[in-house]
Image (cartoon, helix red, strand yellow):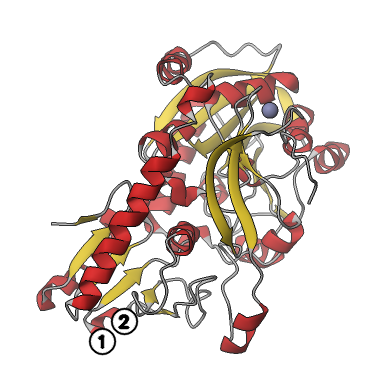
Amino acid sequence: MTEKLSCRFCGSALTETFVDLGKTPLANSYIKAEADIAKEKSYPLHARVCAECFLVQVEDAVPAEDIFSDYAYFSSFSPSWVEHARRYSDALTARLGLNETSMVMEVASNDGYLLRHFVEKKIPVLGIEPAANVAVAAEKVGVTTEVAFFGKETAERLVEGGKKADLIAANNVMAHVPDINDFISGFPILLADEGVLTVEFPHLLNLIEKIQFDTIYHEHYSYLSLLTVEKMLARHGMRVFDVEELPTHGGSLRVFACKEGARHAEGSGLQDIRRKEQAAKLGSLDAYHGFTPFVEKARAQLLEFLKEAKEQGKTVAAYGAAAKGNTLLNYSSVGLDLISFVADKNPEKQDTFLPGSHIPVFAPEKITEEKPDYVLILPWNIAEEISREMAHIRSWGGQFAIAIPEFRLLA
Ligand SMILES: [Zn+2]
């Protein structure tokens, strides 16, 4: 780690703190055997904001290869996420007039959760995905997948192989890229002249306004606003021509971009979001200073609830072994003494221990067996889906709780 940190986009010195969440293990490093707990490593989780370009970022503690080569997240395990992908494919197919002569690519295509909807429409696709194990799952649903990290080199190699994209989807990946300039420089290379890039990312404005500090973890290097994304794309010869707001991940943006010289007309969403960000002063350090006290308050509320529940002899389990839950639990120093286990539908995460807190992960049936008094939902972005699926906890008087933006019991 270097002494003087510099902005991963513009290179300026990083001197301003956004929020310092202490030292924690990697949020997606689930521990497979109890014996491995002693070997666990922790890294500083300190988000800073660049005073020049206003990119909020955490330093890269470990190489991206260590984080993503055996990634445990399979997008298709979330029904609401699969539905989001289906709507995307319908909307973009109609908007761009895609057909069997088009080419749709996705960067970080995961298990093919998105491109498979284009395959169903007989539109040619190519996934680009660094995690070999999830790429295998994508091939099984008919999504041809190139196992590679995306960037200039990968883009050039694909173009040499005769591939150009009419649509590139880069959904929830830009934040996970350490070398953001190399990553973005691949898009204008791979796009056809009138090709469209869509980039989706959790909107930094929501992170700030809804105290979503738990979305900060090492694997998530950058926290993006339209302001910084426009600057980044412009530096690489691209322009944003439209923006949509999405409910995903607690409030995301979908940015539509094309090459500078392309003909796409500006949509009204662009001015709307620019105005919102200006109103929130995202172009000034004031918007970023002053975030920490809200984070400290959320932690205090959660701990107060958990300690009180314990004193009253009530049992608390958690649901959803999500990365964001690990940030929350580790920043709050919550361990087995306060939460007895966490349930998750993903078999890859079952029978592991959460990084840091070492709370064991079981299948959701464990909740039915143990009948806890409270179930703390960690992935608040899919809280509705979870409370519907697990509605039977009410049969023994169980109650759901959420910790973000502030602690509350669900009715
Ligand atoms: Zn910067």
Badge 1 marks a residue whose secondary structure is: helix
**Is the CB of the residue bearing disc 2 within 8 angstroms of ligand 1?**
no
* Residue 146 disc label: none
Where does residue 244 sit, x and y in percent of width and height?
A: 44, 26
Q: Quadrant of the C terminus?
A: bottom left
In front: 295, or 136?
295
Where does residue 222 sit, x and y in percent of width and height?
A: 61, 40
Q: Is residue 194 visible?
A: no
In front: 117, or 214?
214
* Structural crowding at the residue carrying mark 1, measured as other residues with C-alpha within 10 Å and reported as few (<14), some (14–19) or many (≥20): few
Q: Quadrant of ligand 1?
A: top right
Q: Residue at x 28, y 55 (%)?
A: 301
Which three-letter amino acid code belongs to the residue tagged 1? Answer: Glu
Q: Residue at x 52, y 38 (%)?
A: 201
Q: Which residue is mark 1?
A: 369
- Disc 1 vs disc 2: Cβ atoms closer than 8 Å? yes
Instruction: Give me the C-alpha separation between circle 1 and circle 2.
Output: 6 Å
Q: Is residue 11 above or below residue 19?
A: above
Q: Which residue is mark 2?
A: 365
Where does residue 283 sit, x and y in percent of width and height?
A: 53, 19
Q: Is residue 18 visible?
A: yes
